[in-house]
Image (spheres, rainbow, N blue to C red):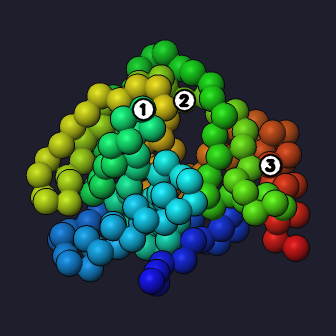
């Protein structure tokens, strides 16, 4: 069914700055649908293009509060709240020895305003807060080659990476 393959921590694709999406093609629409399927299959709430080996600026995410799925092309976080909150965060590309995501607490703005183009080519904007804001920030980071572990202190990052290294063996 799927030609997309999940890239794991250590894969250089995850560290690339992605190029903007220029055209909405049938291939792109098929990839977006497939990514939504992968996200649901793995009980994830978001998936960015580089996680499936595509270095373009698009992502899929779900608002866990409403189950609404967003397919965002060229998403841009245009503003962030001053208020910061710390929550546990994991990533489908950062797996531990049990083949499940490794979690760690990450501090991020509590709310963001995000603009993007949807799969029909329409311009969209939304204020997101709480979990939805966290997800869109996490996934948008992927488009710039940033992983959630980059937001951790060196000590905490090393704790996560120790688990990740055990996954690889």
Look at mark 3 in the image and give the residue it sits on.
160
- On the image, the x and y values in percent for residue 57 come to 35, 61
Residue shown at 14%/47% (left/top)?
123
77 left or right, relative to 107: left
Position in image of residue 146 (x %, y %): 56, 52
Q: Secondary structure at mark 2?
A: strand
Dot 2 and dot 1 residues touching (CB under 8 Å): no
Crowd class of label 3 (few under 14; some 14 to 19; many from 20; radius 10 Å) = many
Front position among marks 1 and 3: 1
Image point 56% across, 65% down: which residue?
A: 14
Rendered position, 117 above or below 136 = below
Q: Kindly identify which residue carries mark 1.
A: 65
In which quadrant will I find the C terminus? bottom right
Residue 83: x percent and y percent? 49, 15
Residue 5 position (above or below residue 67): below
SS category of the residue bearing label 3: helix
Label 2 or label 1, whichever lies nearer to me, is 1
Distance, label 1 to label 3, CA atoms, is 28 Å
Dot 1 falls on a residue whose secondary structure is: loop
Check disc 2: other Cα within 10 Å, few if <14, some if 14-19, many if 20+. many
Is residue 161 found left or right of 14 in the rendered image?
A: right
User: Is residue 164 visible to us here?
Assistant: no
Earlier in the chain: of badge 2 and badge 1, it is 1
Location of mark 2 (residue): 108
């Amino acid at each position: 069914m799927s030609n997309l393959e999940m890239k794991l921590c250590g894969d250089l694709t995850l560290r690339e700055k992605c190029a903007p999406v220029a055209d909405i093609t049938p291939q792109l629409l098929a990839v977006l649908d497939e990514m939504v399927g992968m996200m649901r299959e793995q009980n994830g709430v978001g998936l960015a293009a580089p996680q499936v080996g595509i270095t373009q600026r698009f992502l899929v995410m779900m608002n866990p509060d409403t189950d609404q799925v967003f397919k965002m092309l060229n998403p841009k976080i245009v503003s962030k709240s001053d208020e910061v909150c710390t929550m546990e965060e994991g990533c489908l590309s950062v797996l531990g020895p049990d083949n499940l995501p490794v979690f760690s607490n990450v501090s991020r703005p509590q709310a963001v305003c995000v603009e993007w183009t949807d799969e029909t080519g329409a311009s969209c904007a939304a204020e997101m807060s709480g979990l939805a804001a966290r997800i869109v920030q996490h996934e948008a980071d992927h488009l710039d080659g940033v992983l959630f572990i980059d937001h951790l202190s060196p000590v905490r990052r090393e704790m996560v990476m120790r688990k990740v290294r055990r996954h690889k063996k």
